[in-house]
Image (cartoon, grey):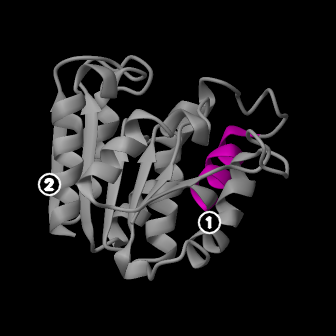
């Protein structure tokens, strides 16, 4: 089963046409996790609330953990990496257009001054919940990282850093075409071929 944690401005419905069709053709089951407060999901959306829901989602997805490949796109990569940390026996981890430096991403939207705390305190809280480096270095399963070279939202430097932190076996695919929001559109054949090849090895 492929379990997807989508991006910040996406919802499950965005994956119900082309993406789900491709995964179905590969012969794999697909589970798309929705976040609290998104679409028809109850609850309040927040960065932390999603983390708290991950154990429940995985425990109730219908397959054993060792039959799962976890996929995270954009912000969802942080939740996929956290899931791999909580459940290290998962079969594989796919990071698409993912984040390596969570502080750098958050600081673009809100500063420590905006929320009236020190920068050190903000960095400490981010490290407490989103220690991407540590979680990737601890995960011993297979990892696939996909990104575009012209991603202007999350720089490909994030992909290179995540690849460096990940343990072997690992693969890195940097697409020449497209950007952050259209990586799948411009690279459809190669994109899904990379996913299938990876999942066949898991």
Determine crowd level at label 2: few under 14, some 14-19, many 20+ residues with C-alpha closer than 10 A. few
**Which residue sits at x=51%, y=62%?**
82
Q: Which mark is residue 166?
A: none
Give the answer, above or below, for where 94 lies relative to 6: below
- For residue 54, the mark is 1
The secondary structure that dominates the magenta segment is helix
Q: Quadrant of residue 54?
A: bottom right
Span shown in magenta: 118-128
Task: Kindly identify which residue carries mark 2.
Answer: 197
Q: Of 18 and 176, which appears nearest the observer?
A: 18
As measured in the structure, the alpha-carbon distance from the residue carrying label 2 to the one carrying label 1 is 26 Å
- Give the residue displayed 39% in from the left and 34% down from the top: 18
Location of residue 170 (image quadrant): bottom left
Residue 173 on image: x %, y %: 17, 39
Where is residue 133? Give x, y as percent: 40, 57
Dot 2 or dot 1, earlier in sequence? 1
Q: Residue at x 43, y 68 (%)?
A: 84
Quick one: quadrant of the C terminus? bottom left
Image location (x, y in percent) of residue 33:
59, 54
Question: Does any portion of residue 131 appear in the rendered image?
Answer: no
Task: State the count of labels.
Answer: 2
Q: Is residue 167 left or right of residue 85?
A: left
Badge 1 density bin: few <14, some 14–19, many ≥20, Cα 10 Å: many
Is 164 magenta? The answer is no
Residue 114 falls left or right of residue 82: right
Image quadrant holding the N terminus, namely bottom left
Whole-percent x, y for residue 13 in the image = 59, 37
């Amino acid at each position: 089963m492929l379990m997807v944690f989508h991006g910040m401005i996406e919802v499950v419905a965005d994956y119900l046409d082309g993406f789900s069709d491709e995964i179905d053709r590969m012969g794999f089951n697909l589970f798309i996790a929705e976040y609290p407060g998104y679409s028809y999901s109850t609850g309040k959306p927040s960065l932390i609330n999603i983390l708290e829901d991950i154990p429940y989602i995985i425990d109730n997805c219908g397959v054993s953990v060792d039959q799962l490949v976890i996929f995270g796109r954009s912000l969802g990569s942080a939740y996929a990496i956290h899931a791999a940390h909580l459940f290290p026996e998962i079969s594989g981890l796919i990071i698409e257009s993912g984040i390596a430096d969570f502080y750098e991403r958050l600081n673009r939207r809100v500063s420590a001054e905006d929320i009236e705390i020190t920068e050190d305190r903000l960095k400490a809280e981010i490290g407490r919940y989103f220690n991407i480096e540590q979680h990737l270095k601890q995960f011993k399963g297979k990892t696939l990282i996909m990104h575009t070279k012209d991603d202007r939202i999350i720089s490909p430097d994030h992909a290179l850093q995540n690849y460096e932190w990940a343990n072997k076996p690992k693969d890195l695919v940097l697409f020449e075409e497209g950007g952050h929001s259209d990586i799948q559109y411009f690279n459809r054949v190669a994109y899904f071929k990379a996913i299938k090849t990876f999942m066949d090895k898991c």
